[in-house]
Amino acid sequence: MGGEKGFTLIELVVVLAIAALLLAVVLPFTFNRRGHDELAGGAREIASALRLARSRAILQNRPVRFVVDIENGFYRAPGASAAHAVPTGSHISLSTAQEEQINDTTGAIRFFPDGSSTGGGIGLSLGAERYDILVDWLTGGVSIHARTAVAAR
């Protein structure tokens, strides 16, 4: 009959609670996806820089080194004007030949003029997600392998 039009306080609270619940469910997926995309992009950039280092060794007919600083989260391709940082929040690791260890936190992967290398791998991780960028010692070929840690039961 002559009632006022509008929403009651209870209706508004229910709508706000539903909206908050939806945001609580959707936002973590959005942020995780962004971190995933940045980590995948970082792995592709490192792989590309490694391939460039191999190409330089072949073209210049001399060995070149791809240097990784795990403490500060940087890598430097031969001929690069500056070191490149890994994606924010991610962790970089290096597996390389002992003779390529520069110090406790820095090492290199060396490429030779015939395309071969000292071999090794670079790990890039963020939370449970990890990418391994592997360098074959015989061919110098570079490959990327994605891994996700499985929760222990």
Image: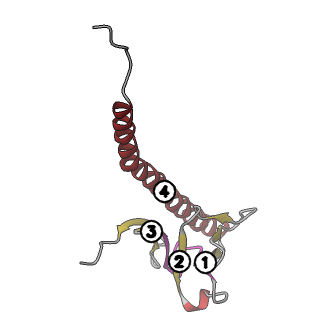
The residue at the point 66 percent across, 63 percent down is 84
Task: Give the labeled residue for mark 3.
Answer: 127
Find out whether the residues at labels 4 and 2 contact each other: C-beta distance under 8 Å: no
The residue at the point 36 percent across, 43 percent down is 22
Give amino acid for label 1: Ile
Give amino acid for label 2: Ser
Distance Cα–Cα, label 3 vs label 2: 14 Å
Which quadrant is the C terminus positioned in? bottom left
Task: Give the labeled residue for mark 2.
Answer: 93
Q: Left or right: 41 with respect to 88?
A: left
Q: Judging from the image, what secondary structure is the residue with disc 1 in?
A: loop
Magenta stretch holds residue 66: no
Residue furthest to the bottom: 98
Q: Neighbour class for label 2 at 10 Å: few (<14), some, many (≥20)?
A: some
Task: Give the labeled residue for mark 4.
Answer: 35
Task: Give the labeled residue for mark 1.
Answer: 70
Q: Position of residue 16 (x, y in %)?
A: 40, 38
**Vertical comparison of 81 with 31: above or below:** below
